Amino acid sequence: MAMQGIWSGTISFSLVAIPVQLVKAIVPGRVSFRLLHSEDYSPLARRMFCPEQERMVPADEIIRGYEIGPDRYIPITDEELASVSPERSRTIEIVEFIDMNEVDPIYFDHPYYLVPLKGGEKAYRLLVEVMRRTNKAGLAKFVLAEREYLVAVKSTEGALALTTLHYSEEILPDEDISPREGKIEAVEKSRIKKSIRQMMADFNPGKYADARREKVMALLKQKAKEKAPVEAPAIAEEEGAGPADLIAALEEIMRQVKQNR
Amino acid sequence: MSRKVVEIAGRRLSLSNLEKDLYPSHGFTKAHVLEYYRRIAAFILPHLHDRALTLKRYPDGVAQAFFFEKRCPSHRPAWTETAEVRGDDGERLTACLVNDLETLLWVANLASLELHVPLARAASPETPDAMVFDLDPGEQADILDCARVALILRDLLSRLRLASYAKTSGQKGLHVYVPLNRQETTFADTKTFSRAVAVIMQKNYPELVTAKMAKEYRKGRVFINWSQNDSAKTMVCVYSLRAREKPVVSFPLEWGELESLAGLGDPERFQVIHSEAVRRAEEKGDLFREMLVKQQKLPHL
């Protein structure tokens, strides 16, 4: 399957620079639906509505506002936002290497793959191999779609994977979650430990599947067999193409034009 | 940041960021854009005159984000001419009228590389002074296919006693214009007429033409976009630059020229770059001048 590149540039550290392309590592499995008008099956469009004036608002009347309190906003223009947006990265510059085991998975946000571009294959393979052996990940700052991310670059089965990481201030504290009441009995502790041991398995994600997705897809397949799909109205139909007089004149002239060409 | 104040007809205009590379792969800077519009002004101004301008601004050059602006920016110089027009949802807005060199350069200084205007003048927004066939090649079709369609259209229209004029879009397509310049014409007329022509063309050349907007019909064909004949739509103005990799221009072509280009079979040769646009306009004059004066009536309506 040809993968659509999201970004291309180089990944570098010290004196190594490898040309790479960033591609998605996951395709969300959610089944998505279009919203249609039940009367004529036209696909529906979303419009912005002003509840105060009770009318649709065109794009050039829409601005952004940062909410500072109930009904209080600081308006901000696209130009102002652009002025503080970081410049698009041309390189993923690894600034330090960390031990992957030290990273709490809660920090992992979005996974991508890095694909070597022409001329970078050899250096790429070398980096994959060394990182795999040492179980180290490279940390880098990287700007994607006007946002600056902290990313970890690690080795996975012969390829480099890039994962965007959450910033630490995005992670909610867990200290209020653990209840402090109640004494833990030694007997209970060992019983739970035993149950866990009995249920131990290797992580094998392939044996789990999204059951609802499978059911929805089976339902759609069944419906497609039973009934023809509905169609949205075409914009221009041959019928009713215009006033009869004009159509007749055009038909006649078209005939002459074709004869002469 | 460089800044330069120029004075034109007694009006002061402050030009900024002149060294900014707006067409990076071509080294074509803001200064070059301003110079192009200064030199082409005599040709483009009559076609912009009294029309509500839609700016298409590329503040960081053609490779970066752009935005459309129908409203005339509020920081405009006091001498800018404007008109109150109706926007997409019927609301009123103030649009720029580019009626003189200083406004043209002010607009170019905003990095509005492309200048888009309606088919009607601001004072009579419901009276199109031209009908247009916007020929847009789908995937696997190109400007050569558009040229074939344009030449058939010319023959068809001339048998209806309607003179027509073609220009490159400056992108992949061609625009065929029919000047009307009559107060009685409405957009309902031009839309009905152009749509009927598009449908007849599709019926007779089903492998070459489609009158339908949907992508699946457009593959390998030329979409005759008749729906541009609408008071809410704009077309890129003749002689406007386009924001492509190279600074090409939406430029008028004589029918004979279009015939020979179609014969040569090289899509790239249709494109007219800025320097050639100035040279050819100075040599041949405004090939679109009839658009401004020629009165024609749509028959059979």
Image (spheres, coloured by chain):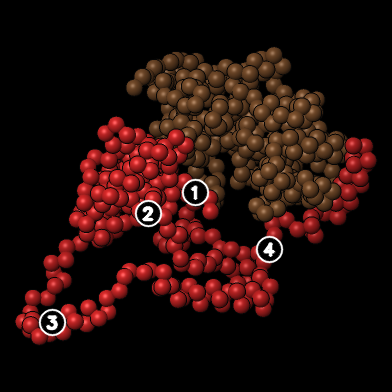
Chain colours: A red, B brown
Sequence-wise first label, 2 or 3:
2
Look at the image and tell me in which quarter the C terminus of chain A lies. top right
The amino acid type found where label 4 is placed reads Pro
The amino acid type found where label 2 is placed reads Glu
Tell me the mark number nearer the camera, choosing from 4 and 3.
3
Using the rendered view, name the quadrant where residue A42 is placed. Answer: bottom right
Return the mark for residue A157. 2
Chain ID of residue with mark 2: A
Return the mark for residue A233. 4
Residue A146 shows in this picture: no
3D distance between C-alphas at marks 1 and 2: 21 Å
Q: Which residue is drawn at 79% across and 48% down?
A: B207
Residue at numbered disc 1:
A4
Tell me the mark number nearer the camera, choosing from 3 and 1.
3
* Mark 4 neighbour density, 10 Å: few (under 14) some (14–19) many (20 or more): few
On the same chain: label 4 and label 3?
Answer: yes
Residue A115 coordinates in the image, percent (x, y): 43, 45
The amino acid type found where label 1 is placed reads Gln
**Secondary structure of residue under mark 1:** loop
Tell me the mark number nearer the camera, choosing from 1 and 2.
2
Residue at numbered disc 3:
A190
Sequence-wise first label, 4 or 1:
1
* Mark 2 neighbour density, 10 Å: few (under 14) some (14–19) many (20 or more): few
**Secondary structure of residue under mark 4:** loop
Sequence-wise first label, 2 or 4:
2
User: Relative to B221, is A18 above or below?
Assistant: above
Sequence-wise first label, 4 or 3:
3
3D distance between C-alphas at marks 4 and 3: 67 Å
